[in-house]
């Protein structure tokens, strides 16, 4: 599945390119990405290239580089995965670089991707899960129009090798677009 380029104010979601490898390699050195977004397996530039291949080579997934709309600098990554049009569902995940954190980048990117999914695919429900300890991810989910539905006990191994409880959020296709995030 090939993603469209999406514009959302100061943020742009665009398809990954091979020349993103150095920015991805640098981002994967961040301890927060290594812990919460699976960066623990990225030990070399070749591993970063393999990650780019995984992000762009899945049939039931669409992934974007989240970049500054003006400068093109990498701000993060966003993927909609486990897309199941028969069940009308998908999951969404993301990471942001340290320079992008606290600026609303993740919420805008998640909302933009969700609106694209609902308008393009036969999907009516998108789920977002994050470790309970990742409080900022809860703020992102809420700002992006997701509703907290459950706590999943010991549901996912993160980069520390520990199975963490997660919070499950979901957004439905007919949920209102968050007013504060209308960018287009």
Image (spheres, helix red, strand yellow):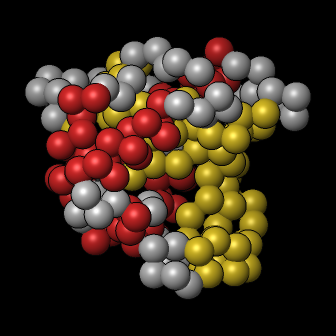
Front-most of residues 176 and 5 = 5
Residue 158 place in picture, x, y as percent = 52, 73
Q: Residue at x 49, y 20 (%)?
A: 3
- Residue 173 is left or right of residue 138, and the answer is right
Which part of the image, by quadrant, shows the N terminus?
A: top right
- Residue 6 is left or right of residue 173, and the answer is left
- Residue 102 is left or right of residue 89, and the answer is left
In the image, residue 37 above or below residue 118: below
Front-most of residues 53 and 117 = 53
Q: Residue at x 32, y 42 (%)?
A: 49
Front-most of residues 151 and 74 = 74
Give the quadrant of residue 131.
bottom right
Residue that extends furthest to the front in the rendered view of this protein: 46
In the image, residue 33 above or below residue 90: below
Front-most of residues 18 and 99 = 18
Residue 6 place in picture, x, y as percent = 40, 19
Q: Residue at x 47, y 31 (%)?
A: 56
- Report if residue 105 is visible in the image: no
Residue 59 place in picture, x, y as percent = 65, 28
Q: Residue at x 45, y 48 (%)?
A: 94
In the image, residue 30 above or below residue 88: below
């Amino acid at each position: 599945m090939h993603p469209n380029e999406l514009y959302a104010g100061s943020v742009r979601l665009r398809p990954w390119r091979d020349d993103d490898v150095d920015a991805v390699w640098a981002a994967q050195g961040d301890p927060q990405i290594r812990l919460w977004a699976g960066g623990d397996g990225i030990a070399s530039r070749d591993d970063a290239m393999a990650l780019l291949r995984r992000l762009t080579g899945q049939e039931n997934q669409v992934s974007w580089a989240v970049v500054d709309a003006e400068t093109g600098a990498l701000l993060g990554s966003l993927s909609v995965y486990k897309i199941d049009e028969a069940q009308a569902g998908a999951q969404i995940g993301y990471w942001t670089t340290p320079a992008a954190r606290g600026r609303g980048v993740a919420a805008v990117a998640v909302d933009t991707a969700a609106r694209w999914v609902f308008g393009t695919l036969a999907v009516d429900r998108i789920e977002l899960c994050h470790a309970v300890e990742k409080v900022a991810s809860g703020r992102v989910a809420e700002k992006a129009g997701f509703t907290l539905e459950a706590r999943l006990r010991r549901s996912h191994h993160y980069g520390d090798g520990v199975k963490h409880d997660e919070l499950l959020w979901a957004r439905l296709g007919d949920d209102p677009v968050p007013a504060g995030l209308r960018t287009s």
